[in-house]
């Protein structure tokens, strides 16, 4: 595994990010923007599922925010992968980084669980629970990510 992670750090793109004065900060800023868009859209979507913003039609509101969340997640995934490539060995050894990855995985499982039940057309009795869990998981991802920079 150590060789694999070292190989990631030696990719041309990772070396370029390390060497560039502006590339790494730009990628980092884009990562933060993506996370901001992701968390904002997820929280608004989940709050609507929990009953907030009742004047807005739930199906249309959630569909719009889901598209934004998926686009923001894609942006965070790409930029996060680039940031990871610079110090892959270091990050992979950090328990808080591993916790962040586990939380993202749990948030994804929660999302697909919600989709599976929603696809059936039934008003999922546990949708509020899944929405609250989603908010908690994505907020925890944000906190774990911030801790990575300080540990």
Image (tube, grey):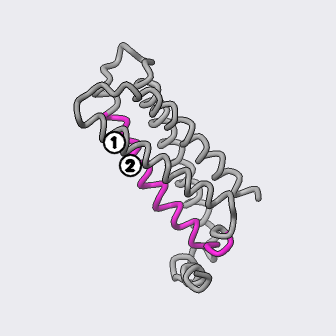
Q: Is residue 112 left or right of residue 151?
A: left
> Residue 100 location, x and y as percent?
60, 54
Cα–Cα span, label 2 and label 1: 6 Å
Q: Residue at x 38, y 14 (%)?
A: 54
Residue 77 shows in this picture: yes
Say what secondary structure mark 2 lies in. helix
In the rendered view, tell whether residue 29 sits above or below residue 116.
Answer: below
What residue is pinned by disc 2? 71
Q: Position of residue 20 (x, y in %)?
A: 61, 73
Left or right: 32 in relation to 52: right
**Quadrant holding the N terminus:** bottom right
Determine the residue positioned at 33% across, 42% down.
67
Left of 123 or right of it: where is 18? right
Write the residue at 41% across / 55% down. Answer: 74
Which mark is drawn over residue 67? 1
Q: How packed is label 1: few (under 14 Cα within 10 Å), some, or many (20 or more)?
A: few
Reply above or below: 11 against 114.
Answer: below
**Quick one: SS at disc 1?**
helix
Badge 2 density bin: few <14, some 14–19, many ≥20, Cα 10 Å: some
Which range of residues does the magenta coloring cover? 63-90
Secondary structure mostly seen in the magenta stretch: helix
The image quarter in which residue 124 lies:
top left
| Residue sitting nearer the eye, 96 or 65 | 96
> Do tag 2 and tag 1 residues touch (Cβ < 8 Å)?
yes
Is 88 inside the magenta-drawn segment?
yes
Task: Report x, y in % for residue 71.
Answer: 38, 49
**Residue 15 visible in image:** no
């Amino acid at each position: 595994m150590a060789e694999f992670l070292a190989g990631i750090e030696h990719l041309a793109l990772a070396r370029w990010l390390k060497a560039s004065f502006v590339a790494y900060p730009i990628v980092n800023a884009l990562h933060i923007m993506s996370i901001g868009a992701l968390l904002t859209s997820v929280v608004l979507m989940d709050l609507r599922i929990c009953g907030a913003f009742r004047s807005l039609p739930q199906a249309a509101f959630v569909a719009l925010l889901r598209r934004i969340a998926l686009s923001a997640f894609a942006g965070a995934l790409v930029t996060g992968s680039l940031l990871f490539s610079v110090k892959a060995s270091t990050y992979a050894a950090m328990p808080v980084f591993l916790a962040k990855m586990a939380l993202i995985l749990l948030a994804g499982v929660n999302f697909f669980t919600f989709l599976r039940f929603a696809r059936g057309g039934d008003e999922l009795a546990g949708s509020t629970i899944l929405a609250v869990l989603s908010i908690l998981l994505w907020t925890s991802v944000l906190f774990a990510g911030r801790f990575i920079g300080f540990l």
